[in-house]
Amino acid sequence: MGNTYSILPDIGLIIEIYEGVFNREMLFNMKEIIHKDENYIPKMKILADLRGVRILPDRTEVITNLQELVIVMKDNIGRVALLTETPEQTAGAQLFAFGVELGEEHIGVYTTLSASLKHLDVDPKDYKTIENELHKLSGRNDREF
């Protein structure tokens, strides 16, 4: 389905789904679109689903681009959970999480939806709503969350 997002204002959550080769344009374009959305509110929690992403061997470039984004948006970023699936995605996401100056309690890397949502301090009663939204956005009902 490509890169897409949903803002759940009642939960205070932005869900972002990324697919393909991870690059600067992918990230910055998504953030620009989200910030123009009428439902966007600074400091919302972010669940970034990176499970459909391939990280190129040059992780330094990826980290530099992510750090640049954090510098630009630092005052508008709420808690962030990066949802990964493969060891490559997890390693790249961990490098990012440790490389930004937001603190490890602010950005977490997880391989399950429930752990991601716990990090974001989401009410468990909202888990099913979020899971359904992820299914809708990804176009995949077979994916386990």
Image: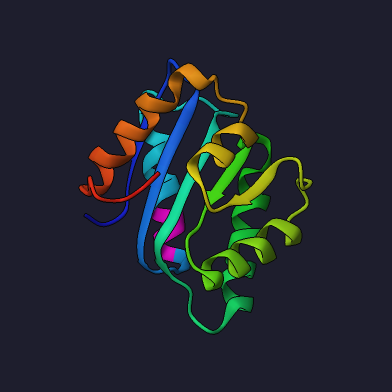
Question: In screen coordinates, is 94 left or right of 136?
Answer: right
Q: Quadrant of residue 131?
A: top left
- Tell me: residue 5, above or below residue 111: above
Report the magenta residues as a range: 25-29
Question: In screen coordinates, is 86 left or right of 1?
Answer: right
Residue 134 percent location from the top left of the image? 33, 40
Q: Residue at x 37, y 26 (%)?
A: 128
Q: Quadrant of residue 116?
A: top right
Q: Residue at x 48, y 28 (%)?
A: 13
Q: How many marks?
A: 0
Looking at the rendered image, the quarter that the N terminus falls into is: bottom left
Q: Main secondary structure of the magenta part?
A: helix
Residue 108 percent location from the top left of the image? 66, 47
Question: In screen coordinates, is 113 left or right of 95?
Answer: left
Q: Residue at x 58, y 44 (%)?
A: 81
Applied colour scheme: rainbow
Q: Is residue 78 visible?
A: no
Q: Nearer the viewer, residue 67 or 86?
A: 86
Q: Residue at x 27, y 41 (%)?
A: 135
Residue 82 percent location from the top left of the image? 55, 50
Q: Nearer the viewer, residue 137 or 25?
A: 137
Question: In screen coordinates, is 11 left or right of 62?
Answer: left
Looking at the rendered image, the quarter that the C terminus falls into is: top left
Is 144 inside the magenta-drawn segment?
no
Q: Is residue 107 visible?
A: yes
Residue 80 percent location from the top left of the image? 60, 41
- Tell me: residue 36, above or below residue 41: below
